[in-house]
Amino acid sequence: MHRSSQTGVGGRFALRWAVFSRCVHRTVRSSPAPRHHVSTVTHWPQGAHVTRTGLLRRVFTAAAGISILLLGTTAAAPPPTSKAAPVAPVAQTGAQLAASWTGPLSTRGRYIVDANGNRFKLKAGNWDGAEGHYLGSGDPTQPANNHAGEVSYDIPLGLDRASLPQILADFHTLGLNAIRLPFADALIHDTSIVPNAAVAANPQLDGDTPLQVYDAVVAALTNDGFAVILNNHTTTYRWCCGVDGNERWNSGQTTAQWEADWLFMVARYKDNKRVVGADLRNEVRRDVTDDPNWGWYDDHDEYAAFEQAGNTILQADPDMLIIMEGINWTGVPLNGLPHGRPMLTPVANLSNTLIDSGKLVYSAHFYAYTGPANSGATSGLGVTSDPRYEDFAPQQLAQVVNQEALFVTQSGQHFTAPVWVSEFGAAGRGSTDTKEQAWFDNFTNILAQNDTDFAIWPLIGWTDSSGNLQDNWALLSYDANGRRTGIEDPGDWRATDWNALVDAPSYTGQVPQVDHWNMLDLDHADYDVSSTMLAQPDWSYGNRKGDCPDSERLVGLGRSDSRGLCTDAGEPQKASGAWTVVTDERYVTEGDWAPGYSKLQCPDDSFAVGYSVNGNAMAALLCAPSAAALPTTGHDVWFDQGDNRPSSGGSVASDWAPGYYKGQCADGEYLAGVAYTWNGNQGGVPDALLCRPLS
């Protein structure tokens, strides 16, 4: 989201800060800095042994910690240098773009792939308007009461000025292959008719509701080869962001209503395989009194809400990508009070597991004027001494972006997934903000070097009757007669960086299949991500239970914290037939492998795929039958005195149960049993695993 071209923040009311991007106005200043090569791959450190509450506190102040670490070393942006003339991307026709990929999309490790397994890098832009441009007071049809004086009439912007074929042709000239299409929940329930003036350049839309116009835009985009990602941006038609009543998925509505709205949208476009993703909610942030959180399982828990919604959507439409943006802001932005921008940092220790391991994409937003702990405010309340992203030197910026988001692309971890930077941008034509320009150059360089999926904000704006851009952040601006002023036209400093990003070398072609590692979180509730078991009655009544996706098996447990680890590495084929719930020692038939301990052990030729706990004590083990015979010899993995994990292999460079000991079988093994004891106040928590080779 970007700054309003009309109004500042500070002073609207005590807590209306420019926290979340599109709210702030600043005078903009000249030209971009030279490119720098940066190292971008780092490992997220394992957490210390602390309580879960302490961990969560640490997670939500991680952004502030990044600022503190780098505050003393921030440097002024390098002076601008001359650059080669920009070369615009080669524009594909709609037919060419459509032929270049096949829906639906899924993921393989850090990459998004099409239905044929070929890399599909999201080179996207945001076509906003259907989330609303209204600033919240006065007549919403008056330009002065709308962002940048642009009245969107709650439909994608620009349909009054340019025909759909013209707009789509201009999108092709930008080198795009995907469009993020924001909408408000209000759109779904709005039966009003869009004024004819709002679709003057597209008279075929006369008499349509906002949702019907949205339908027409989706159809036009996908017919022209673009991938469309639906983005639930706001609840009401209100320009985002800040403390505006749209802070969370359940602001102004219940979580159940939000899920129902998503199911409505998914069902509406289910047959269109170029509608590829559900971007669950935009920039989740603090409201007047409460912060969102990641893993507390209350009404403000983004982790739990996104987990539930994602799986609900996949049950309705297994083809959709589920896109989860990290927390955009917590705390009060005043010096001396805790505050920050967690983004994806909590994912390092608490990642999501969906019923399909190949459908999760994480996302994050970056703008120059905000920062890891800077709200983006420039005056009044909300202004702090925390550095902005534009204050960091290139190497430091790369480090921060990695710590807040791109670490998720590290292979072979419980959190590994594609990261889509679904919003970034800067003021273009007419800007003299040299600091922002240097940031844009450095940031697009980071995206290019990391081969990161991206979407710029925004695509479309207006040009007024005097030929002035009303929103110079837009890549394309149209006047009332449909004349375009675009980033590729002379005079827009962003063209060089944009073109370099779009045409940057990237991984193409077939992406090999990858092994997955996914965590289960039974801290507060059930964690059922097996489609098989979701269709069955409660298999361990009265206990918290977790089961792996149907394509995976259980390979690890945490001690005293109820967390587990799943994988599909070397996954044995499951046989048909019922799965076994084990609550006693009847299947311990090859000798006592943990003398003096109680044991839950799978029947021979079956392997653990889930478990249940009461408190933190073991209650049951869930076992699935193997289609082939499995070895019955194995070894104990004790973790009652410390971590006992393989020295190499899956998810060993990441901590899926921070603060607690963990036991984990090797990648080529299956978990056959768990030992525990109630002696010595041990409380029945798991102490040892029985690991056996897969072959």
Image (spheres, rainbow, N blue to C red):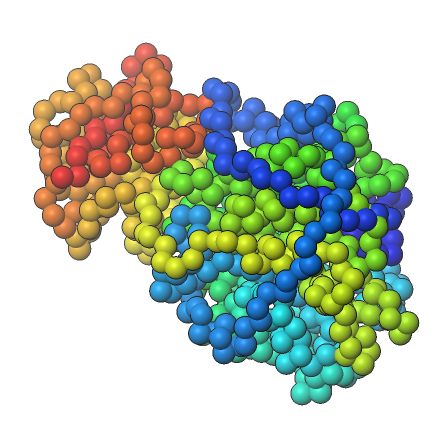
Q: Is residue 70 above or below residue 243?
A: above
The residue that appears at 17% across and 17% down in the rendered structure is 595
Percent coordinates x, y for residue 417 in the rendering:
45, 47
The quarter of the picture where residue 335 lies is top right
Q: Is residue 520 above or below residue 663?
A: below
For this view, does 315 lie left or right of residue 89?
left
The residue that appears at 42% across and 46% down in the rendered structure is 353
The quarter of the picture where residue 672 lies is top left
For this view, does 510 lie left or right of residue 451?
left
The quarter of the picture where residue 370 lies is top right
Q: Is residue 257 above or below residue 343?
A: below
Residue placed furthest toward the top:
680
Task: Give whichever of 657, 393 is nearer the camera.
Answer: 393
The residue that appears at 14% across and 34% down in the rendered structure is 587
Q: What is the quadrant of the C terminus in the image?
A: top left
Percent coordinates x, y for residue 134 in the rendering:
80, 63
Whether residue 330 is visible to the viewer of this picture, yes or no, is no
Whether residue 409 is visible to the viewer of this picture, yes or no, is yes
The residue that appears at 80% across and 81% down in the rendered structure is 481
Percent coordinates x, y for residue 578 in the rendering:
19, 51
The number of discs equals: 0
Percent coordinates x, y for residue 537 in the rendering:
32, 51
Task: Give whichever of 47, 296 is nearer the camera.
Answer: 47
